[in-house]
Amino acid sequence: MTGTAETIDLYDRAIDRLVRFHPDVMTLAGELTADDSPAPMASALAAYLNLTSTDSDDLAAARASWETLSQTDRNEREQAHAAAIGAWLSGDWSGAASLLDALLLQFPTDVLALMIGHQLDFFLGDAQNLRDRPLRSLRELPPDDPHAAFVRGMAAFGLEESGHYGQALDTGLAAVTANADDVWAIHAVVHTFEMQGLVDEGIRFLASDATRWETGNMFTAHNWWHLALYQLEAGDPQRSLDIYDTEIHNADSAGVPIEMLDASALLWRLFLDGVDTGDRFPLLAQAWAPKLAGESWYSFNDLHGVIAFAGADRRDDVHDVIETRQRWLEGGHEANATNVRMTAEIGLPACRAVLAFIEDRHHDVIQLLMPIRRNFHHFGGSHAQRDALQRTLLESALRSGRYELARALVSERLGLRESSVYGWSQRARAVRGLGDDAAAAAAEQRATAVRARFAP
Ligand SMILES: [Fe+2]
């Protein structure tokens, strides 16, 4: 990279903080960009940090860093970063991800390109590249490279999202053994347990001394969210609400989209289950409101804002978001190609389904979600995050008396997650609706037995 020995040393320290999601990376990026002509990679890092928030409020800062970068003498690699950042800023998230892949062909050990590309694959819901991008680089990193294990943690998450649970678990645990504060690898292991309904193992893993994730990193709230999901799966909504209040969203929360997504997704699950969430939805909707006021930047965020509005019964605001996004699509756009595609294919139908749900139009929910349920990943996020939509579909099937459909949807879930109070309870409702009281009683028994396993 271009820069003095002092700058390169500072940059290396920033990357070391970044792979741990440690907030010191923000301070170090500030130091790196403090003088009038920062090193190109310093500007690139600052731009990426603002882009990965997925918050349109951070776009101006990202653009300013990119302009500085574009006006600086750059080498070939730094030029490639400038091109990727430019694509992302124009709303071509897929193009940015591809440009970083091209950069990594030539410079496979560029940990910043890899980590940002990995985040882009996540925002795009590209499970295969979440797996393959880190695997390509891992082989090129010397085993004694201090960041090789973090790349292994990234590979673990991709292996999980693409369904290789055995390899994901081994790879993730190896990464955590190397660095107990590798919160991304911890998260990969947590997802692996989540996808298989291994709630006991997940709770035990998060509580173990082998992991350090509970405080002081930029991924804290999300891993607490996963613990709250385990508690829901174990049939204990009150513990989920306690986690929500202390760790996910409260009056002191910073109001950043990445954390508010989790807040919406958790409250919506509780709402679907008929749990009283008190005044949490109105408070969360207040926090989301300014983020939804402008033009759409990331459809995945729009949906979660709409969920908060819906839960707070702010129907006018739900309608408003849907109508502005619809008009925005009809306007035709050169820019924002990725979000236009995401909004049209998944985001807008999903927002309409949420509105239909709170208006008790459950047939409409089914009509909106059934055709796209295999493609929810096209607007990003993880399987666990998108499960809020799968549950919405199932709940509407039950509430509208579509019991055969509900039974089929539950059977898919139980086939992958036997230890699910939620799954067995929903099966009981479905088969009771079909008139099979004996099967309903058996399913309820299974739900009771699983709940008892997790009783404190
Ligand atoms: Fe996650």
Image (cartoon, rainbow, N blue to C red):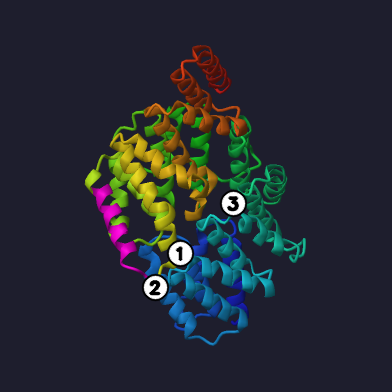
Q: Rate crowding at label 2 as few (under 14), some (14 to 19) or many (20 or more) other CA atoms within 10 Å.
A: few
C-alpha distance separating marks 3 and 2: 35 Å
Mark 2 residue CB less than 8 A from any atom of ligand 1 = no
Report if residue 166 is visible in the image.
Answer: yes
- Residue at 62 percent of width and 65 percent of height: 114
- The picture quadrant where one finds residue 397 is top left
Main SS of residues in magenta: helix
C-alpha distance separating marks 3 and 1: 25 Å
Residue of label 1 = 338
User: Of the residues shown, which amino acid type is indicated by label 1?
Assistant: Thr
**Marked residue nearer the N-terminal end (3 or 1):** 3
Q: Nearer the viewer, mark 3 or mark 2?
A: 2
Residue 328: within the magenta? yes
- Residue at 70 percent of width and 59 percent of height: 135
Residue 213: within the magenta? no
Q: Nearer the viewer, mark 3 or mark 1?
A: 1
User: Of the residues shown, which amino acid type is indicated by label 2?
Assistant: Glu
Residue of label 2 = 334
Q: Rate crowding at label 1 as few (under 14), some (14 to 19) or many (20 or more) other CA atoms within 10 Å.
A: many
What's the magenta region?
317-333
Q: Residue furthest left?
A: 316
Q: Secondary structure at mark 1?
A: helix
Q: Residue furthest bottom?
A: 73
**In this picture, is 34 found above or below 349?**
below
Residue 97 locus on image (x, y percent):
55, 66
Given residues 32 and 19, the one toward you in this image is 19
Report if residue 304 is visible in the image.
Answer: no
Given residues 305 and 52, the one toward you in this image is 305
- Residue at 57 percent of width and 56 percent of height: 126
Residue 137 locus on image (x, y percent):
70, 64
